[in-house]
Image: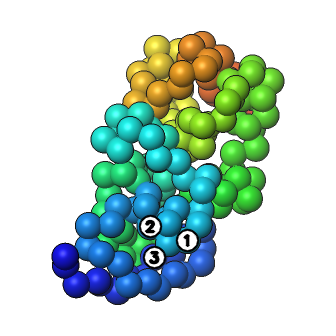
Amino acid sequence: MAEPIKVTIFVNGVGHTKRIEPRTHLIDFLRDELGIKSARVACEHGVCGACTVRLDGDIVRGCLVLAVQADGQEVETIDGASDRGDLAELQAAFHAHNALQCGFCTSGMLLTASSLLAEKPQASREQVREYMSGNYCRCTGYQAIVDAVCEVLEKRRVDTVA
């Protein structure tokens, strides 16, 4: 067993200094060390997207990033983005389209969709499908999720023109 390492990670704007094993994944640090249960664990192989968080502004899979790699960096979970109001439009659209059913994948879906809106404001429906394809949902069949994201994209395009 490796010697614990001291890390300081800023999560949703608050610094947390802990001694952890070097092999601790970021998602386990968030859930087990900090008690942030909105960050989900599912496949633990980086393919489902349930553990999606932002690391210094970029979306990452928390199960693929070691906590020591986030030392000194800012991690944002769904809680931080939601509390700030960044996701209000998407959350309303997900609700309106029933795109959140059981809710297990929703935090990863919303963070990924938020990045899509920022990176590809002119995205087509097919580009939305492609961008969101790394996030799995077993309940909705994706149609409602794509509809919700496309609605926000269209609304923003109309608002920009007006």
Task: Specify the quadrant that holds the N terminus.
Answer: bottom left
Among the 4 quarters of the image, the one containing residue 14? bottom right
Please state the total of marks drawn on the protein image. 3
- Front one among 17 and 159: 17
Among the 4 quarters of the image, the one containing residue 5? bottom left
**Residue type, numbered disc 1:** Leu
Label 3: state its secondary structure. strand
Badge 1 density bin: few <14, some 14–19, many ≥20, Cα 10 Å? few
Please state which of the two labelled residues, at mark 2 or mark 3, is closer to the viewer: 2
Query: Are the residues at dot 1 and dot 2 in contact (C-beta closer than 8 Å)?
Result: yes
x and y percent of residue 158 in the render? 73, 25
Q: CA distance from mark 1 to mark 2?
A: 7 Å
x and y percent of residue 49 in the render? 44, 38
Query: Are the residues at dot 2 and dot 3 in contact (C-beta closer than 8 Å)?
Result: yes
Task: Specify the quadrant that holds the C terminus.
Answer: top right
Tell me the tag on residue 55.
none
**Residue type, numbered disc 2:** Phe
Q: Which residue is mark 1?
A: 34
Q: Earlier in the sequence, mark 1 or mark 2?
A: 2
